[in-house]
Amino acid sequence: MPAWLTVVGIGDDGFAGLGRAARRALLEASVVYGGERHLAMLPARLAARRAAWPRPFDLAPLLAERSGAVCVLASGDPMLFGVGATLARQLPAGELRVLPAPSSLSLAAARLGWPLQDVATVSLVGRPLPTLNAHLHDGARVFVLSADGRTPAALAELLNARGFGATRMSVLEHLGGELERRIDGRADQWSGGEVAALNLVALDCRATEGAPRLPLTCGLPDDAFRHDGQLTKRDVRAITLARLAPAPGELLWDVGAGSGSIGIEWMRAHPTCRAIAIEGHAERQRFIEHNRDALGVPGLQLVAGRAPAALRGLPVPDAVFIGGGATVPGVLEACWASLREGGRLVANAVTLQGEAALAAWRERHGGTLTRIALADAQPLGGFDTWRQALPITLLDVTKPAGGGAMNAANIIDTIDGTNSVSSTNPANATNATNATNATNATSVRNPANAASVTNPAVADSQHEP
């Protein structure tokens, strides 16, 4: 099928700034979709019907127009945080034609003289402000796509709070248009107030004394996390994450998440890595919510509940980490049943009972068992000596082909059924009650999903000039 849809990138200079191919596509279109700001840029002589995006955003009306020549207007480069990328996921390549204009990032790099390949990009359109925290490093350069005219002031406040008050900020309004303007200043001296809604912020990051130094490697300092002691310690965490082996786009279940450290560092490994933290302790849930924001991964999902009941209905994981609960009936079984073929299961244990459970699992499913014994030098009188930490037993096993992902609900139902009919062991009845309560109390908290903008890709496409 020939391309029936043309996505036209348009800058703040409007129709006059379009190339010949883009103008011809608009002149020949029967209908043009876009945001209200973009549609207002079209000259009256265009015969095409104007159709503003529905709210909430929905592609269905556009996709129903396949019988005619259709155009979509998007800001700058439609494939960069734009609606073009959204459409490319919905349509075969042959049905879609994209005519990009210079993006706001390209224009900003040109104005500042920054090599674009050396600059990180963060979009705050429909995304939480703490997303920036993962990119704060001394000397880093970052382009921030603002949500609105209040974003620069909010960025200055965040930078000060994170120890980056010396950062140089440049706010670039209406890039490429007649109203283009630049405002410069330091984060700790920012007094710009609200600026034009259409703006991009360039950050030349400078850390002040005492700012936390968060490396790109796994194994963040323990004091980077808020916790009550239920924390996979730094060196063990680094070994555990090496065994989990995060790759772009993969999903991790962090079961018995504690402070959320494993899931958080998994997501910091790559911007497309995803994680779900399952934790039943109310105070530790608050720790996870704080830590995910502070460390720049507010998209970490929190399931408030206890495994195995809280695993019901979760998407299929590529990897599972069990940091607590390996001895709880059904946890290992439910995680293994849900794991995709080729997925990795890693579990840590510190007790004899936990170690025995992992050893028994290895007997049935293979894998490797590793004993981790660490010691730190600490004072002893006028001397120093080694203080041993409790040894950790680590199970690392890959699910073989042919053992495809199953529904964890079947395992959970089996465990619940066994516990509910048992009259010889009161502990089993208690476990069944707790599992049922945990299921009923399960909730998913994902600030990225709760953002005020329904579709960040489309919101981004309206952002760029």
Image (cartoon, helix red, strand yellow):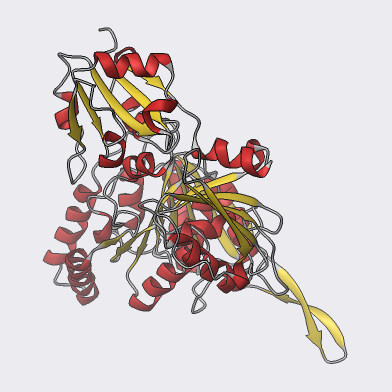
Task: Classify residue 99 by image quadrant.
Answer: top left
Instruction: Please report the residue visible at 67 percent of the width from the left and 52 percent of the height from the top.
Output: 140
Front in this rendered view, residue 375 or 166: 166
Q: Farthest residue toward the bottom?
A: 381
Front in this rendered view, residue 290 or 223: 290
- Can residue 77 be seen by looking at this rendering? yes
Q: Position of residue 263 (x, y in %)?
A: 46, 57
Say which quadrant the C terminus sits in.
top left
Front in this rendered view, residue 410 or 28: 28
Position of 188 with respect to 208 (left or right) is: left
Number of disc labels: 0
- Can residue 368 be seen by looking at this rendering? no
Q: Farthest residue toward the top?
A: 1
Q: Farthest residue toward the right?
A: 382
- Work out whether 232 lies above or below 378: above
Front in this rendered view, residue 388 or 37: 37
- Work out whether 32 lies above or below 289: above
Instruction: Please report the residue visible at 52 percent of the width from the left and 66 percent of the height from the top.
Output: 192
- Work out whether 28 lies above or below 294: above
